[in-house]
Image: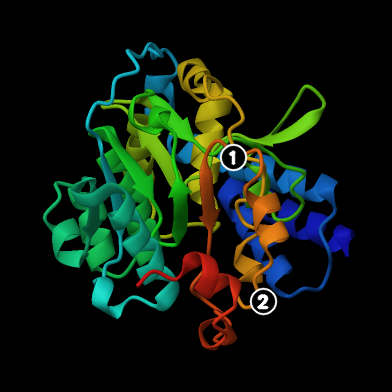
Amino acid sequence: MTGLAHKVAGAYRQAGLGAACTCLAYNALKKTRAFGLSDKLYARQLKWQLDAIRTICCETLDRYKAAVCNVESNHIDDGRKIYSIWLQGENSAPPVVKSCLTKLRKLYGDRFVLLTENDVNSLPIDETVKKKFAAGLMSKNMYANIVRMFLLKQGAVWCDATLFVESMPDEVFSAPYYSIHRVNNLDGKSGQKSVVVERKGQRETLWSTFFWSMCKNNIVANFCYDMFCEYWSKKNDIFDYYIFDMIVRVGYDDVPALKMMIDTLPINNNGNVHKLNPLLHQDYDEAKMRALREGSVLQVFKLAHKHFNQSALSNPNSFFNRVVWQD
């Protein structure tokens, strides 16, 4: 069925509909599950998707190409706050989310700030973005992406509401840039692959949008926020769920100052950031938990509240109750 994919993509290009529509053609074909995309085809799709972003956000991209990166740091805690968003409010959050938020509050007290819908509505976000969100053209997830970059522009730490934090090094609060940098042999969707760069014979995931810390006016935050604003000034939807990572990848590939900023961060995680989640309903195993933590300077785990196995709650000896649950 690869030939079919080529035919559809070719038809879109011949019709003058461009790279974004070609991406839509591939996504539609994927949803039918009529064929499996090879690594080569995924790479081609990702290239078209990145090129689509470059075309749509050309003004912002051109403006940042000559930007200068200041990676110096005095390694002094600058007081940046830790932010999470749960628009509906903490009282209506599911157990996984409540536990993650409670853990952050226990660790960092008033330094942790949870934003609800009322809080977000009061932020001076780009007016076009606000209008399109209010009109239902933008998902809550996408709006939260833009809000996080606005907050990071001011100097902040961002943790997704489903990020379980056990400990963070002091550098999170003093380095100009910090995220999750891990070795990763990731296979899967092209959007996920956009965060993976091959260096020195290994695949590395250089950032994670669900955990970021940046000093004020960091080029990564400024670039992503401005790219989102230009994108939504021209479009009313997104062509791929992973467009956020793709925007960062365009910056990494095309903006030398942004690449320099991201490359300042050494590997700080053992690659197990997603591996606690599938264990939550299982009986706790100290050896497994020790292995998940071993070798990570940054002790965080990305969990999920969707499709949560309820047996994790009822089993007092589950990983969820032994590790994650917070009274």
Which residue lies most toward the left here? 122
Q: Amino acid at mark 1?
A: Leu
Q: Residue 50, which numbered label? A: 1
Q: Is residue 115 left or right of residue 21?
A: left
Q: Could you tell me which quadrant the C terminus lies in?
A: bottom left
Q: Quadrant of residue 279?
A: bottom right
Q: Residue 115, position in %: x, y?
A: 22, 58
Q: Which residue is mark 2?
A: 282
Q: Residue at x 54, y 38 (%)?
A: 207
Q: Is residue 53 visible to us here? A: no
Q: In the rendered structure, which disc, 2 or 1, sits on the residue that comes first in sequence?
A: 1
Q: Residue 267, position in %: x, y?
A: 61, 30
Q: Residue 247, position in %: x, y?
A: 49, 40
Within 10 Å of the Cα at label 1, are there few (<14), some (14-19), or many (20+) other Cα atoms? many
Q: Is residue 189 visible to us here? A: yes
Q: Residue 315, position in %: x, y?
A: 57, 85
Query: Which of the two discs, 2 and 1, sits closer to the camera?
Result: 2
For label 1, the SS is helix
Measure the C-alpha gap from mark 2 to mark 1: 40 Å
On screen, residue 78 above or below 207: above
Q: Residue at x 46, y 16 (%)?
A: 257
On screen, residue 98 above or below 58: below
Q: Is residue 65 left or right of residue 75?
A: right
Q: Quadrant of residue 134?
A: bottom left
Q: Amino acid at mark 2?
A: Gln
Name the residue nearer the viewer: 55 or 27. Answer: 27
On screen, residue 252 above or below 99: above
Within 10 Å of the Cα at label 2, are there few (<14), some (14-19), or many (20+) other Cα atoms? some
Q: Could you tell me which quadrant the N terminus lies in?
A: bottom right
Name the residue nearer the viewer: 167 or 286. Answer: 286
